[in-house]
Amino acid sequence: MDATSAPHLIPPEMPQYGEEKHVFELMQTMLEQLLIYQPEDPISFLIKHLQRDNDNVPKIVILGPPASGKTTIAMWLCKHLSSNLLTSDNLIERKSSSVAEEARKHYQKSKSVPGPLLIKLIQQRLTDEDCVKKGWILDGIPETREQALVIQTLGIAPRHVIVLSAPDTVLIERNLGKRIDPQTREIYHTTFDWPPELEVQNRLIEPEGISELETAQKLLVYHRNIIRILPSYPKILKTINADQPCVDVFYQALTFVQSGHRSNAPFTPRVLLLGPMGSGKRLQAGLLAQKYGLVNVCCGQLLKEAVADKSKIGKLIWSFLEKKVTVPDSIIMKMLAERLDRQDCVQKGWVLHGVPRDLDQAQKLDSLGYIPNRYNDYAYEVFTTLKPD
């Protein structure tokens, strides 16, 4: 498109197609991948990226203090989303990895894994086919700001970050009752979540490091690190109170990870207002048009303007009005299409009211391609906000 030939006449179908097919988001994602990985052959890289079709797989980080329930929530999310759980433990337990073997040696000596080695394990694991196709959930990683920055530098970008929080006194008390099933790695609690199966009860073990003093020391380290990690994820982060039933925490986390973030794509509002006479459609349409710079399109007003202009279609409309006969839908749709196709509606967006009045009009409006992306029914709003005597 030649920039010197402005103003451009944009076909109404173009922005609607881009919005419907998420073209802007697709191009944005591909550009991000190019800038992160900087491949020698960008075209073949983009082709492989499109073939993977994994832009919407889960990429989640769950953080929280000891005994906050983050591993339990992470495991439940994995089952619900059919994703992959990545923890420090299962990363170093990988059998076919020399990096994991080195990490195990470090862990046996010091009961911890050096940050750079942990990052290598994560990077290696995320290249596996199951993580590429089904996504991943990082449990308790990153542990420090330095790890968070290195992870970002490597192009590992979560879409959702969940931070669980609870008072330290609650966490210390809760940690004392923690038990682990060594076969399934499921976490149970002597008070809040005791398994009903006797077989599972008999094989539960008490994990190391759950004494009051050890938990307090871990909490000090966590609080010192978490305040430096959070600024790395300002727009994709949600804090959830963990001092409530696990099921409630899970559903809050699930709702968050299933929500999409606000898109940066150019957006042209197409608003449809419905409601009976006296519901305030005309007033609300005027206010919306004034606030957001939309074109206020009233079907009744269009009919009056067409008659006043004494145009060919206006004379045809008048012949029906004069006989007090309903104007045919075909004429209304033709007049409406002509108005909505004008450049002010295409560029600024519109707020439509007075039509459709029935299902046939709605279907014709849809078949012509005038599909609203915002809808409000004022009759429903008024009805649901009324309080009984």
Image (cartoon, rainbow, N blue to C red):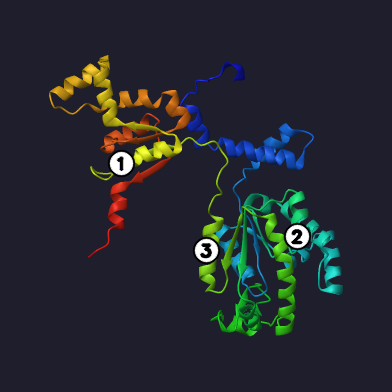
Report helix, strand or loop for mark 3: helix
**How far apart in space, not on screen, are marks 2 and 1 (Cα)?**
52 Å
Quarter of the rendering occupied by the N terminus: top right
Residue 156 is situated, as x and y percent measured from the top left of the image, at 71, 51
Residue 190 is situated, as x and y percent measured from the top left of the image, at 59, 84
**Residue at the location (36% across, 31% down)?**
367
Tell me the crowding category of disc 3: few under 14, some 14 to 19, or many 20 or more residues within 10 angstroms, Cα based.
some
Question: Three-letter amino acid code at disc 2?
Answer: Arg
Residue 273 is situated, as x and y percent measured from the top left of the image, at 34, 41
Tell me the crowding category of disc 1: few under 14, some 14 to 19, or many 20 or more residues within 10 angstroms, Cα based.
many
Q: Viewer-proximal residue, 160 or 302?
A: 302
- Between discs 3 and 2, the one toward the N terminus: 2
- Between discs 3 and 1, the one toward the N terminus: 3
Question: Three-letter amino acid code at disc 1?
Answer: Lys
Question: Three-letter amino acid code at disc 3?
Answer: Gln
Image disc number at residue 145 = 2
Q: Viewer-proximal residue, 228 or 175?
A: 228
Report helix, strand or loop for mark 1: helix
Residue 308 is situated, as x and y percent measured from the top left of the image, at 25, 20
Image disc number at residue 281 = 1
Quarter of the rendering occupied by the C terminus: bottom left
Image disc number at residue 252 = 3
